[in-house]
Image (cartoon, rainbow, N blue to C red):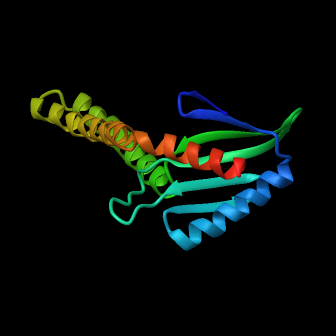
């Protein structure tokens, strides 16, 4: 059963961790055949991403879960996040936007006789605002993916 809380969920199952990992490996094989999902496992860390034939995007949420033993089986602690490529791109976007804003503000502050220099920091703020808008739009556009991924994991564990 999944308990949702701000893109972080816990999926509890009566299966033991080795059984969960075996079912996950079966899901990986199925995903490779159908190409509907991209699935991977590294130790007890699970990754799943919806990959439709149309509308593929690095901004789609990726399910990252860690299998942990529980008193009545296993818990999978799941976080939804962007793919590593999207995270790197967005991190670079926000770092460059911040650097631009800080440097442009410093230049404008030391050149008070040129009032047009105050437009430079607005460019940096605009870049930061556009980045935040992209993140917000992606999260709202792909909001159904989180439920689909959680449901897919729950179904794979209940078979």
Q: Along the horizontal axis of the image, is 111 left or right of 137?
A: left
Q: Position of residue 123 (x, y in %)?
A: 21, 39
- Residue 15 visible in the snapshot: yes
Q: Which residue occupies 30% across, 37% down?
A: 133
Q: Is residue 112 above or below residue 69?
A: above
46 or 59, nearer to the observer: 46
- Residue 43 visible in the snapshot: no
Q: Which residue occupies 56% across, 73% down?
A: 33
Q: Position of residue 8 (x, y in %)?
A: 60, 33
126 or 67, nearer to the observer: 67
Q: Along the horizontal axis of the image, is 1 left or right of 144?
A: right
Q: How many numbered discs sit on the rendered protein?
A: 0
Q: Position of residue 105 (x, y in %)?
A: 28, 32
Q: Residue 9 is drawn in which quadrant?
A: top right
The residue at the far bottom in this view is: 33
The residue at the far right in this view is: 71
Q: Along the horizontal axis of the image, is 141 left or right of 48?
A: left
Viewport quadrant of the N terminus = top right
Q: Position of residue 7 (x, y in %)?
A: 54, 34
Q: Which residue occupies 32% across, 38% down?
A: 128
């Amino acid at each position: 059963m999944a308990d949702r809380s701000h893109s972080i969920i816990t999926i509890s199952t009566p299966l033991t961790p080795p059984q969960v990992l075996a079912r996950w490996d079966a899901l990986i094989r199925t995903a490779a055949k159908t190409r509907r999902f991209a699935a991977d496992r590294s130790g007890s860390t699970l990754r799943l991403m919806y990959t439709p034939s149309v509308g593929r995007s690095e901004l789609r949420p990726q399910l990252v879960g860690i299998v942990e033993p529980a008193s009545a089986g296993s818990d999978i602690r799941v976080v939804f996040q962007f793919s590593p490529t999207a995270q790197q791109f967005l991190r670079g976007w926000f770092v460059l936007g911040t650097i631009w804003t800080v440097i442009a503000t410093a230049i404008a502050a030391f050149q008070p006789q040129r009032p047009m220099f105050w437009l430079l920091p607005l460019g940096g703020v605009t870049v930061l605002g556009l980045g935040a808008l992209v993140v917000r739009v992606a999260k709202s556009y792909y909001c159904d993916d989180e439920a689909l991924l959680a449901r897919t994991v729950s179904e794979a564990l209940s078979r």
